[in-house]
Image (spheres, rainbow, N blue to C red):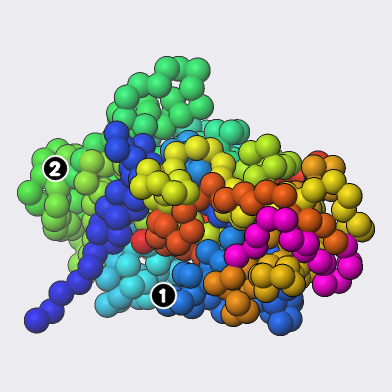
């Protein structure tokens, strides 16, 4: 049995994931940071493992969580910067890996594209405008390098001086540039309802409204033929209506088919050239996507990525995110519970570490990352943060070493590196039920340092 999971399925999954952040019974997704202790070699973080054990370990050294709001999430597509001198693929409805229909971006030679989304058929300019390439041939029917940057926000396709034909898709707002644009990905959306003429996405709304489903966007001359003394007649037949075109010729060969009306409702097309005194000219029509070019930028440009951006601001959450230590792991956790309850967490930030409050008279200063021990009970832990003013230690488990032994009040703890000593006066629970929720994504990184005056934008891209 032959079967395939289509790109539409991937886009559907991306849409479902994104919608989960804003539904009435929304999924509670949190960004978490963890792993303050060094890797065996900090320059080479451990490879993540998808095991039950790894999930437990991730909780063991987790530091804090911040809720990912719906406004922190966007569909995304690959970033392809327009660069002068590069060769861009055209939009085709029939890339399938069976023919050399694409063009090498650097050399201009023909190449095979397995699918539309393997093709370099759209670009973003330095003005953060996104354009789809409709045609890459000059008047002589030759594929050329793009040397004229596409500009403008017209709702109709336009041709630049180098012979390329482009279709404006949308512009990224300044706010979304700051939040979602990365070196590899850019945000994408559909607008739908009129957002108002002052909105950054109003031009995209106009493009969506002007889109024509099943129109013929390009007709490619696949064989110029010979012997033509006048332009042949172009006949377009198929299951749509209204498409018309004329031919151009030079030196006895057909060089271009010029669309005079795109028509509508086509899903298949046959182009026939007759007359003109010559023979053997042939052409192939390119049909717009469902809804027409620009009707749904997410589907048309391959929006099966979701990008999330969470900003950590200073000691976020009134200190939930400490600023006196680093971290080496980030991840996403779904539906964690509040400590000691079966209630889903919904607060903006959560402290995952337990705490020890010490009595007055502490000797020395506890150091981050050192091992603390309580000789009387045998309990151990690793210091994540130490608030000397309020005499509060935040700590994580020392994995694999007497994890079942809890700290107790009235007994001393001692820092293994600093030699600091203090008497525990109170125990503090974490704000999260340990091991609750599901870790659906994590990555191990080199150490990321924090500071009291630091902002961190953490972008995570998930491919469906």
Question: Would residue 260 be visible to someone looking at this image?
Answer: no
Q: Secondary structure at mark 2?
A: loop
Whether residue 33 is situated above or below residue 298 in the rendered picture: below
**Quadrant (top left, top right, bottom left, bottom right) of the N terminus:** bottom left
As drawn, the residue found furthest toward the right would be 364
Please name whichever residue, 347 or 359, is drawn nearer the observer in this view of the structure.
359
Residue matched to label 1: 52
For marks 2 and 1, give the CA distance. Answer: 52 Å
Most frequent secondary structure within the magenta stretch: loop
Looking at the rendering, the stretch of residues picked out in magenta corresponds to: 406-420
Q: Label 1's element? A: helix
Residue 122 as seen in the image, left or right of residue 260: right
> Which numbered dot is residue 265?
2
- In the image, is residue 419 part of the stretch drawn in magenta? yes
Residue 55 makes an appearance in the image: yes
Q: Position of residue 193 (x, y in %)?
A: 32, 24
List x then y, in percent, for residue 392: 75, 49
**Mark 2 or mark 1: whose residue is earlier in sequence:** 1
**Mark 2 near mark 1, Cβ–Cβ under 8 Å?**
no
The quadrant of the rendering that contains the C terminus is bottom left
Q: Residue at x 65, y 60 (%)?
A: 408
Q: Quadrant of residue 275?
A: bottom left
Q: Rate crowding at label 1 as few (under 14), some (14 to 19) or many (20 or more) other CA atoms within 10 Å.
A: few
Q: Residue at horizontal 36%, vertical 37%?
A: 22
Q: Nearer the viewer, residue 404 or 307?
A: 404
Q: Position of residue 99 (x, y in %)?
A: 30, 76
Q: Which of labels 2 and 1 is toward the front? A: 1
Say which residue appears at 42% left-offset and 77% top-offset: 51
In the image, is residue 272 above or below residue 279? above
What x and y, as percent, mark residue 126?
63, 44
Residue at (85% x, 61% y) in the render: 421
């Amino acid at each position: 049995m032959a079967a395939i999971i289509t790109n539409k399925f991937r886009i559907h999954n991306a849409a479902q994931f994104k919608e989960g952040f804003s539904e009435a019974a929304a999924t509670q997704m949190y960004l978490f940071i963890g792993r303050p202790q060094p890797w065996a070699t900090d320059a080479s973080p451990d490879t993540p493992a998808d095991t039950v054990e790894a999930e437990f370990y991730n909780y063991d050294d987790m530091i804090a969580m911040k809720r990912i709001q719906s406004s922190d999430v966007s569909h995304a597509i690959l970033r392809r910067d327009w660069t002068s001198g590069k060769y861009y693929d055209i939009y085709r409805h029939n890339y399938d890996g069976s023919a050399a229909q694409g063009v090498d971006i650097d050399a201009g030679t023909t190449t095979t594209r397995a699918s539309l989304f393997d093709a370099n058929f759209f670009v973003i300019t330095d003005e953060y405008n996104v354009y789809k390439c409709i045609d890459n041939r000059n008047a002589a029917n030759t594929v050329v390098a793009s040397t004229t940057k596409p500009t403008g926000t017209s709702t109709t396709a336009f041709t630049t001086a180098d012979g390329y034909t482009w279709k404006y898709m949308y512009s990224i707002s300044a706010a979304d540039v700051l939040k979602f644009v990365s070196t590899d990905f850019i945000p994408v959306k559909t607008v739908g309802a009129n957002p108002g003429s002052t909105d950054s996405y109003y031009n995209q709304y106009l493009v969506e409204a002007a889109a024509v489903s099943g129109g013929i966007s390009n007709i490619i001359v696949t064989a110029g033929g010979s012997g033509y003394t006048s332009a042949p007649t172009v006949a377009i037949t198929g299951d749509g209506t209204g498409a018309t075109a004329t031919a151009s010729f030079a030196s006895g060969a057909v060089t271009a088919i010029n669309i005079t009306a795109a028509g509508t409702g086509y899903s298949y097309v046959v182009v026939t050239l007759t007359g003109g005194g010559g023979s053997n000219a042939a052409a192939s029509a390119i049909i717009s996507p469902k809804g027409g070019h620009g009707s749904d930028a997410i589907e048309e440009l391959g929006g099966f990525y979701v990008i999330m951006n969470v900003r950590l601001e200073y000691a976020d959450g009134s200190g939930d995110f400490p600023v006196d230590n680093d971290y080496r792991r980030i991840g996403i956790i779904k539906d964690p519970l509040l400590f000691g309850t079966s209630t889903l967490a919904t607060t903006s930030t959560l402290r995952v570490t337990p705490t020890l409050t010490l009595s007055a008279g502490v000797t020395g200063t506890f150091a981050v990352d050192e091992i603390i021990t309580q000789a009387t009970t045998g309990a151990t832990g690793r210091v994540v943060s130490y608030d000397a003013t309020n005499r509060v230690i935040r700590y994580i488990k020392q994995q694999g070493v007497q994890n079942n032994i809890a700290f107790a009040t009235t007994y001393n703890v001692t820092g293994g590196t600093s030699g600091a000593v203090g008497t525990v006066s109170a125990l503090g629970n974490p704000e999260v039920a340990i091991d609750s929720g599901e870790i659906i994504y994590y990555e191990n990184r080199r150490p990321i340092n924090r500071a009291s005056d630091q902002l961190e934008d953490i972008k995570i891209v998930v491919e469906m």
